[in-house]
């Protein structure tokens, strides 16, 4: 087996003779030269990814004030930072929303503002003591005013990421973007062929202490990221770097519509061609990397997979879902991932970026277990009423009025002849119709865009739907959209009373 040492490769980097290619270029080279030939001809393969990395943040040290303050709560541009560490150390999370601007501005935006040189407003509230007498403090700071600004990201650079679609009858706003109803679109994330962990899935090189490109600065892998799941091809990295050395080109704040703030980061890892195993793994193509398309219309932890799909198919712009061509859009930027890999390649070629020996490899066994819930929340089926009367759209308004009067609900679900939900009518709708004396059939006055819930969905979802749309009742439907019950605000009130 053809092999090289890391010290040999670093010496070539120092003297400017190293042959460096990007992970996008490597597959064709391996096809042409074979793995042994690729190890002989190539020294370093650069990778890159650029996408939303919510599990990110920065430790900030403000220095001591006079009189001193022990910060209990702090706000940076009205974004709360955690102060329960030491007197003037804070941790600012990228996804923390602003107190006054909500989700349109968050921790990620504060980080970007600091990187581009803006001044931020700091408001601190202390826990007074003899050694820290100051109670409150306000000041204005720039990035250079902090003693340290150390980025520590618990989970970055997913090896690959599930794609998302939505089978429900309503638009959904998620961390995977806006998903249209009826499998109307597919969103995906990840760089595919350029993904650092897809190019070293066995952790031949990447490990604790590996030097990386982190938003334009040189950072390091601390270890495996949270929810690290290498057994199923979803490895992650925990990384660190100096915010003061980062570049706004590779660090951008964003807000997902009706979801919240996040931080887009560029991360790249140079992989040395130490052996033929690494040559083979860096020859991966988009067609080799597959992910499930998960249905976010099912608002549960375990979402069903609609189908498996490769990054090659996703990047084509459309895929087939159930016989229908559906458009695919990336949430991450492959163009910027290329820029990360290209920039890193140039830094290695100029001798500015040496490769580091990992102190220990990443674990090949991860942990991505679900949360242990000791107090289970009830589902819709636990509190709904099955005693529900449905009507057809062609019945007279007068008949519907009698059903409302004699029934236990102020709502009547309207169904098709095969029992599928097609609308809803309320006592108020009927009262207006009777008073006007005009409409004679339910079809003329019913609401056709009707919200519903399923039997096995959590009660919190029903409560949120009622509140969001200012309605008082929801039909409960099965997977064929047939009405099997009704849940109302009264059901939720009684449940809350029992809990108290």
Image: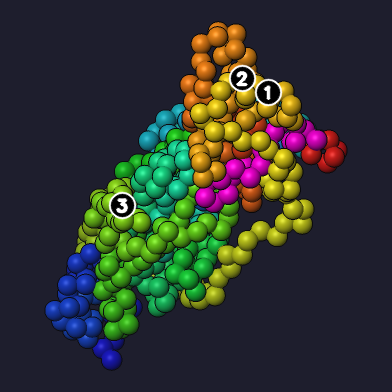
Q: How is the image coloured?
A: rainbow
Residue 267 position in % (x across, y down): 37, 56
* In the image: residue 82, left or right of residue 169: right
Q: Is the residue marked by circle 2 packed among few (<14), some (14-19), or many (20+) residues within 10 Å?
A: some
Q: Which residues are magenta?
A: 476-494
Total marks in image: 3
- The residues tagged by marks 1 and 3 sit, at their Cα atoms, a distance apart of 44 Å
Q: Residue furthest left?
A: 32
Q: Earlier in the sequence, mark 1 or mark 3?
A: 3
Secondary structure type for disc 2: helix
Label drawn at residue 202: none
Per the rendering, the mark at residue 402 is: 1
Residue 78 in view of the camera:
no
Which residue is the extreme one toward the top?
A: 436
State the CA–CA distance, disc 2 to disc 1.
6 Å
Residue 492 on the magenta span: yes
**Mark 2 highlights which residue?**
398
């Amino acid at each position: 087996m053809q092999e090289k040492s890391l010290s040999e490769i670093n010496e070539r980097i120092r003297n400017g003779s190293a042959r460096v290619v990007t992970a996008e270029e490597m597959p064709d080279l391996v096809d042409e030269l074979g793995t042994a030939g690729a190890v002989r001809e190539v020294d370093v393969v650069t990778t890159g990814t650029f996408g939303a990395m919510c599990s990110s943040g920065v430790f900030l040290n403000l220095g001591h004030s006079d009189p001193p303050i022990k910060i209990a709560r702090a706000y940076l541009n009205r974004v709360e930072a955690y102060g329960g560490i030491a007197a003037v150390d804070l941790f600012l999370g990228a996804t923390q929303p602003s107190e006054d601007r909500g989700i349109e501005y968050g921790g990620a935006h504060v980080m970007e503002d600091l990187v581009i040189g803006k001044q931020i407003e700091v408001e601190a509230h202390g826990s007074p003591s003899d050694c820290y007498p100051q109670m409150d403090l306000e000041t204005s700071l720039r990035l250079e005013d902090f003693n340290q600004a150390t980025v520590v990201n618990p989970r970055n650079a997913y090896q690959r990421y599930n794609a998302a679609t939505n089978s429900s009858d309503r638009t959904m706003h998620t961390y995977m973007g806006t998903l249209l109803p009826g499998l109307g679109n597919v969103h995906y994330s990840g760089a595919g062929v350029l993904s650092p962990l897809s190019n070293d899935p066995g952790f031949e090189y990447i490990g604790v202490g590996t030097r990386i490109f982190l938003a334009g600065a040189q950072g390091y892998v601390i270890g495996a990221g949270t929810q690290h799941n290498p057994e199923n091809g979803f490895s992650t990295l925990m990384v660190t770097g100096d915010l003061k050395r980062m570049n706004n080109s590779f660090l951008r704040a964003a807000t997902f519509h009706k979801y919240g703030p996040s931080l887009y980061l560029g991360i790249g890892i140079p992989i040395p061609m130490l052996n033929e195993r690494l040559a083979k793994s860096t020859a991966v193509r988009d067609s080799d990397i597959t992910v499930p398309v998960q249905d976010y219309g099912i608002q549960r932890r375990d979402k069903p997979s609609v189908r498996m799909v490769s990054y090659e198919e996703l990047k084509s712009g459309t895929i087939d879902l159930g016989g229908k061509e559906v458009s695919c859009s990336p949430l991450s930027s492959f163009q910027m991932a290329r820029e990360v890999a290209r920039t890193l390649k140039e830094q290695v070629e100029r001798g500015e970026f040496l490769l580091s020996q990992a102190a220990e490899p990443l674990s090949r066994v991860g942990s991505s277990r679900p949360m242990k819930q000791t107090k289970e929340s009830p589902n819709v089926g636990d509190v709904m009423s099955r005693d529900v009367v449905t009507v057809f759209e062609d019945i007279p308004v007068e008949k519907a009025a009698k059903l409302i009067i004699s029934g236990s609900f102020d709502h009547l679900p309207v169904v098709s002849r095969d029992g599928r939900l097609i609308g809803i009518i309320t006592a108020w709708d009927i009262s207006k119709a009777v008073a006007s004396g005009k409409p004679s059939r339910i079809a003329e006055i019913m609401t056709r865009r009707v919200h519903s819930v399923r039997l096995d969905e959590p009660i919190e979802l029903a409560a949120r739907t009622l509140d969001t749309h200012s309605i008082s009742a929801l039909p409960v439907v099965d997977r064929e959209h047939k009405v099997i019950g009704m849940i109302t605000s009264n059901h939720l009130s009684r449940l809350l009373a029992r809990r108290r």
